[in-house]
Amino acid sequence: MKGLRLHEREAVELDHLGVRENRQFCLIDRRGILFNGKRMPELMAVEADYDGVSLALTFPDGRRISDELVDGEPVDARFFSEPMQVTPVSEPLSAALSEYSGKELRLVRANPDLSGIDRGPSGVVSLMSEASVAHLSEVAEAEVDPRRFRMLFEADGFEPHAEDSLVGRDVRIGDARVRFNGHIGRCRVTKMDPETGKPTLETLDAIDSYRGHLETTEPLPFGIYGEVLQPGAVRVGDPVALAA
């Protein structure tokens, strides 16, 4: 699970690892290396539905496979070049994903005491404004689906890219206190349609055309990331404001 958007839930709980349910399950290849959308964007087309006990996967051809997850013996893996142990959870779902991808894959549960975010605990929260997406749509001359960016929070009531001004500052989001540490530099995954995983929009060219000259923490910036200083609940409609 990646990119849990707040408007799809009534509320989430933030702690020092972000939202615990986010990126709870991952795929590894036969070498134990993280296998994600950068390596195979077509995985985006597989829909997942988890009820806390069973996980159901719906494939683009309409095939749906469900299995009750049972933790197996931990195995060694590498996420973003860092070694860690993960737990296989379902051989039937692993087999189905392997068949779909043409790769030998295993579905695993990430270590709940470690961050599954590539930036680590300093980047477990991400935020962008709806106005930024609307502006990019104008630049790209095409409607941009915000799911391309896989953000945790989307904020309303901002001017386009006003979230940039929050970098380096402490911010209240609902009951939580967050410090935003940098801009999110974008990669080719944003070109992929979130429904099909196929490249359908030159997002990087569009971002570069009006933001490539900016002095930011990462190139091709769109949205910001940060860490949780004080855990708390965040609900739909909660304000985003500078902390006192």
Image (cartoon, rainbow, N blue to C red):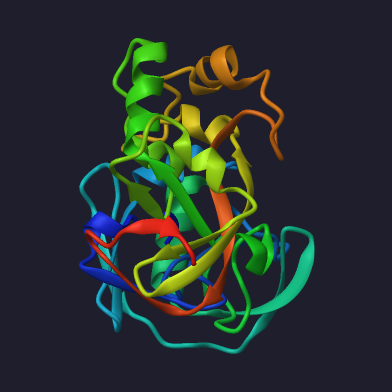
Residue 164 place in picture, x, y as percent: 54, 39
Examine the image and state in which quarter residue 160 appears. Answer: top left
Q: Residue drawn at (41%, 35%), measured in percent from left and top?
A: 197
Answer left or right for 21 relative to 168.
Answer: left
Residue in the foreground of this view, choosing between 179 and 10 = 179
Q: Residue drawn at (45%, 24%), measured in percent from left and top?
A: 199
Residue 219 place in picture, x, y as percent: 69, 31
Residue in the foreground of this view, choosing between 71 and 183 = 183
- Residue 163 can be seen, yes or no: yes
- Where is the N terminus found, in terms of image quarters? bottom left
Residue in the foreground of this view, choosing between 82 and 210 = 210
Examine the image and state in which quarter residue 114 appears. Answer: bottom right
Please tell me whether residue 221 is drawn above or below residue 208 in the rendered image.
Answer: below
Residue 177 place in picture, x, y as percent: 49, 70
Please tell me whether residue 224 is drawn above or below residue 49 in the rendered image.
Answer: above
Q: Of all residues shown, which one is farthest toward the front? A: 244
Q: Residue drawn at (49%, 67%), measured in percent from left and top?
A: 244
- Residue 104 can be seen, yes or no: no
Residue in the foreground of this view, choosing between 189 and 196 = 189
Residue 66 place in picture, x, y as percent: 27, 70
Please tell me whether residue 189 is drawn above or below residue 150 in the rendered image.
Answer: above
Examine the image and state in which quarter residue 8 appears. Answer: bottom left
Q: Residue drawn at (50%, 16%), measured in percent from left and top?
A: 206
